[in-house]
Image (cartoon, rainbow, N blue to C red):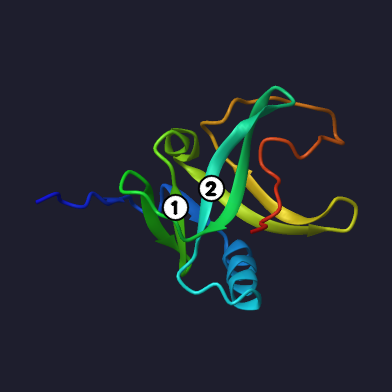
Amino acid sequence: MLEEISTQINTDTVVLSSAAAQAVQNILAEKNLEGYALRIYVAGGGCGGTQFGMALDNNFRDIDTTFESEGVKVVVDEVSIDYLMGASIDYVDDPQRGAGFVVDSPNAKAHSHGADACACGGSCACNN
């Protein structure tokens, strides 16, 4: 008999702010996506740093890491989890840059820009 493998991690490893959790919950409710989770993944490197992507997903694999943060189920693949350890995810509504999710991860490649830094390495839209 094949045992199902499910990896659980401490929710302190990747933390959603209450604003981010509320934004995800609102999207899930608007789209009537019961049973879906927020999938966070490495989407490449841009501006010299790691970029993250997000999607609403209900296709979970045995090797995915799953956990709950602020009442939202979060799923991370086996490669991306190393980049997301210790990360915080927030939702901001900036009048100049617009609204979106921002990932702050100590394990992503650091890079710097001027005071008008681009949002690479973390900002993304949550679309399904």
Amino acid type at image mark 2: Ile
Residue that appears at 90% across and 52% down:
96
Q: In the rendered view, does 69 fall on the left or right side of 109?
A: left
Front in this rendered view, residue 93 or 67: 67
Badge 2, how many Cα within 10 Å: few under 14, some, many 20+?
many
Q: Tell me: residue 113, above or below residue 24.
A: above
Residue that appears at 52% across and 44% down:
87
Tell me residue 59's x, y (percent).
44, 56
Amino acid type at image mark 1: Val
Q: CA distance from mark 1 to mark 2?
A: 6 Å
Front in this rendered view, residue 118 or 32: 32
Tell me residue 3's x, y (percent).
15, 51
**Count of residue discs:** 2
Residue that appears at 59% across and 54% down:
55
Q: Residue furthest top?
A: 48
The secondary element bearing badge 1 is classed as strand
Residue 78: image quadrant is: top left
Whether pointer 1 and pointer 2 mark residues with C-beta atoms closer than 8 Å, the reply is yes
Q: Residue furthest front?
A: 1
Front in this rendered view, residue 4 or 116: 4
The secondary element bearing badge 2 is classed as strand
Q: Tell me: residue 33, above or below residue 42.
A: below
For disc 2, the marked residue is 40
First in sequence: mark 1 or mark 2?
2
Q: Which mark is residue 94?
A: none
